[in-house]
Image: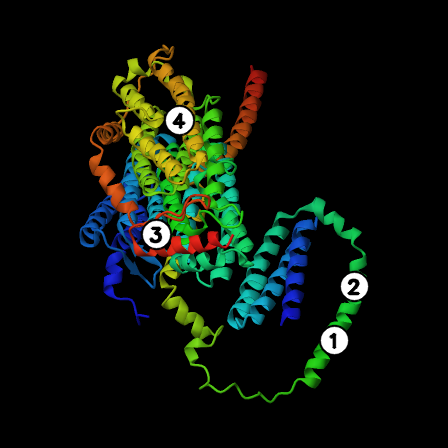
Amino acid sequence: MEILFILFAAIAVAGALNVILQRNPIYSAIGLIVTLCALAGLFLTLAAQFIAAIQIIVYAGAIMVLFVFVIMLLNIREEESKIDRQRYLKWLAAPLFVALLAEVYFVIRVVSYDPKPLPAQGAVPPGQILGTVESIGNAMFTTYLLPFEATSVLILMAIVGSMLLARRERTVSEVTIVTAEQIEAAQLEREDEAHETETVGAGH
Amino acid sequence: MPTGITSNELWLIAPELIITLFACLALVVDIVAGRGRGRWTALFCLTGIGFALISTGILYSEHHGSERAAFYRMVAVDDYAIFFKFLFLIAAALTILISVRYLDVERHQSGEFYALIMFAVLGMMFMASGTDLLSLYVSLELMAIAVYVLVGYLRNDRKSNEAAIKYFLLGAFSSGIMLYGISLFYGAAASTNLSDISAAVVELTAEGQPMRYLLLIALVLMAAGMCFKIAAVPFHMWAPDAYEGAPTPVTAFMSVAVKAASFAMFTRIFLDGFGAMRYLPGGLPGWALILGIAAAVTITWGNIAATTQKNVKRLLAYSSIGHAGYLLLGLVAGNRTGYTGILIYLLVYTFMNLGAWTVIIALRREGIAGDEVEDLNGLVHKAPALAVFMLVFLLALAGIPPTAGFIGKYYIFLALIEAGSVESNPWMYALAVLAVLMTAVAIYYYYTIVKAMFLTDSDAKIAVEPTRVQWSVAAAAFVLTIGMGVLPQFFINRSVEAARRFQVYPQRPQAAPTPARSTAPQTGQLRQRDNGTNEN
């Protein structure tokens, strides 16, 4: 168990260092994913399998996708040009691919399909098995009900707040759009007028 | 363990439930009322605060003098929590009152502003009553996120944006530091409940325990996180910028209610949870030393930096940093007088500071910021009543009798001197002397405002027209500032009641073992401490 802890902890720390040391934000994001996966491993060693799964699905999955999306949308060119420097990565890709294949092969060949019997249910009362969805749900809706509900209010308030800050201000934006159009229209008009006066002047 | 949550427990958090309900409905009212009709939402929120005040009053009369834990010891209803709930609700109501006109002037009238204030108050109320690090942390964030948004409320104002970003980044950073401290305490004590932690800490910090260094680090992290929230030096950098950039009513709200809430949480955690770590055996510094140094630096830096400010908002920001230092001293003193001092100080500070901010807001007109010291020039000719109010608020902030500010400072200094004589600790006297000296510095910079108002003529002939509401808020704050100074007994009694729940924690190791004091748990703590010293 301790070896596992040291292994996962080391990966987590290395990933975290990677987040702040990489110059390319995409690599930083990947470093963060590594950290989050290692944390999920740590949760597993603490018999918190549900939280480990949630960690992977929500953080390493959903939230990191958003991160990467935002980084891509921001389109930081200067940093991207540095990708070329890390050419050695593509030499790492082939062995990793082989390792992945080997892993898949190993899983298919070795892991048996017979589910092992679960530990006798009578030994531990179901409420006290750690890390299951039941025990977490139980704790969340009894002992931690108040912080749980407070968090829900917090999230509602955060949504309201971010809407307030991000919402386009109707009055101001309308004014700016209109002025932009007006400038163009005014210019056209002015040109027309100039033209007209010219022609009128020529007529005289 | 009880099997469920009874309706009685819901009744105990009735004021919070009312605030939640009205805050959520305020968002609906805002939509129904339509754009730019924010004052209807303001009125609605004020009604909600009124109901919450009534229910808090009922709770006070029902549970006066007792302590009721609710929701699996996540919150407790006691005199301390109720004292602070009154304070937050009144501060929020006054803030809403002075905001309406300000937002009209800024052309940013919208109902969400008031809803966010209500959400912030909800967080504050749980911060005052939380007895578990988890519920305290969630409520702290509830308050903090609402205030981050409020600081950045003026979206088209660069200063407001900058202030919000600074406050948000540093706030998030400090929350991280504090969470790290919380996780270490949880790891050591195997519980987030303050009473469990306080029981575990006594054993774990004894000499020869390997865990004591870990707990010391956790304590330092918690102290750093809390010092960020109360803007104590060296974690004060965000305060002047955030105070200057925020819309002025929000600045008032931050310097009064947010500060009071952070102190409510700070005091509760450090006394109920980490009380035994006030002095640590075996040459390790306890929180009395850590916070003592922080308080000394905060008072000195806050007051000296304030002397150089030209902007009233920044000046009051630095002065509020200084006040945070005085409040910390009440905690450092570590006796009942000190605990009472924190409460009475926060109470009087609320009114005198809100009053001063109200005067600043009343000066705000379209196109004129009104927050430089020069903008106050000749105020006595333009609006004599406001100038006199401001004078009294400034005298109170400086702590001059017969204003209320004197009572607060008196209790803090008295607590330090008592602590100095009981613990035969000369450093407590030194802190008291420093605090008094810095009050003299404070009088200097408050005087620059007074000078501008009364002795300098203004060239600008712009009339100052406070609205009736602003005028009434300033007048109410004025009456309370004078009233609490002249007839303080009612407020002192309430503060003493509220502070009664905290024990007096172990004294300095060098001091002769004090005879056992009044209450039972306290003697247990003292005995533990004595054992620790005998082993030396």
Q: Residues within 10 Å of mark 1 (few under 14, many from 20)?
A: few
Residues at discs 3 and 1 both on one chain: no
Q: Would you say residue B108 is visible in this rendering?
A: no
Q: Determine contact: label 4, label 2, CB under 8 Å.
A: no
Q: Are the residues under badges 2 and 3 in a single subunit?
A: no
Does the residue at mark 3 contact the one at mark 1 (Cβ under 8 Å)? Answer: no
The percent position of residue B196, horizontal first and vertical second, equals 40, 60
Q: Amino acid at mark 4?
A: Val
Label 4 residue SS: helix
**Alpha-carbon distance for marks 1 and 2?**
15 Å
Q: Classify B442 as above or below A75.
A: above
For the residues beneath circles 3 and 4, the answer to whether they share a chain is yes
Q: CA distance from mark 3 to mark 4?
A: 34 Å
> Residue A91 occupies which quadrant of the picture?
bottom right
Where residue A183 sits: x, y (%)? 52, 30
Q: Residue at x 59, y 64 (%)?
A: A39
Parent chain of label 3: B
User: For residue B126, which numbered disc appears in the image?
Assistant: 3
Q: Which residue is mark 1?
A: A101
The disc labelled 1 sits on which kind of residue? Leu
Please indicate whether residue A142 sits to the left or right of residue B430 in the image. left
As measured in the structure, the alpha-carbon distance from the residue carrying label 4 to the one carrying label 1 is 75 Å
